[in-house]
Image (spheres, grey):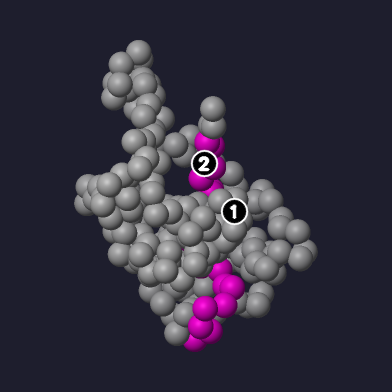
Amino acid sequence: MDNPYPEKLPYSEIPDSPPDRVLAREVATYKRAVARLIAEGNEGRFVLIKGDDIIGLWDSFWEAANAGRMQFGMVPFAVHQVLTWEPVIRQRYGGRDGIVSPSRRRIMQNPYVETVHYSELLDLSPEHVLARELATYKREAGRLIAEGHEGRFVLIRDGEIIGLWDSFGEAADAGRARFGMVPMMVRQILTRERVLRQRYV
């Protein structure tokens, strides 16, 4: 089909992400699902993707991103707007297209430049769907770390610790199998949580 938008491309032409990129699986998942999502009337909404799974859809980027952070913690996941035509973003670095300074490259490769102790995680508002789960995690994290579980993934539902798994996928699959597609938290157990800072200009 003809492209009526010179600075946009159809979703079918979104390039594949290199396999070694952090969000390569999420990009592939989006490309597989986008036609169905559009057909179901979700164009313009924001989809949250973790690995091979579509977690849910929200009306704003921040709602989806906050849901991802609360459910998964500071681990990689994708939030993408569902669009038939994807905008093409052109950036200039150092005065030339595609040239990135070494310092900027280091920041892009490792945006987690700070950490915060688990006890310093901000509380959620009481009406937030995962407020009890986060409170439970903060209350139990010290014990779980002392028992040698740092680095594992904890599944929390309705303020109760359901179990521990060695990977995010195992914990998420167990939660969906037991509870279905309802709010729950899968979080990696860490003494210090990474802080992701983003700059928008």
**Residue lying furthest top:** 95
Residue type (three-letter) at the residue carrying disc 2? Leu
How many marks the image carries: the answer is 2
| Front label number (1 vs 2) | 1
The one of 145 and 30 positioned closer to us in this rendering: 30
Mark 2 highlights which residue? 196
Q: Is residue 189 magenta?
A: yes
Q: Is residue 192 above or below residue 149?
A: above
Crowding near the residue tagged with mark 1, few <14, some 14–19, many ≥20 C-alpha atoms within 10 Å: some
- First in sequence, mark 1 or 2: give its number: 1
Crowding near the residue tagged with mark 2, few <14, some 14–19, many ≥20 C-alpha atoms within 10 Å: few
Q: Where does the image place residue 76, in percent across and percent down from the top left?
A: 42, 52
Whether label 1 touches label 2, CB < 8 Å: no
Q: Residue at x 27, y 47 (%)?
A: 2
Judge from the rendering whether residue 137 lies leftward or rightward of residue 194; answer left or right: right
What SS does tag 1 mark? loop
Q: Where does the image place residue 11, in percent across and percent down from the top left?
A: 33, 53
Q: Where does the image place residue 181, in percent across and percent down from the top left?
A: 52, 78
Mark 1 highlights which residue? 60
**Residue lying furthest bottom:** 178
Residue type (three-letter) at the residue carrying disc 1? Ser
Q: Is residue 28 magenta?
A: no
Judge from the rendering whether residue 53 lies leftward or rightward of residue 141; answer left or right: left
Q: Where does the image place residue 101, in percent across and percent down from the top left?
A: 33, 19
What SS does tag 2 mark? loop
Span of residues in magenta: 178-198
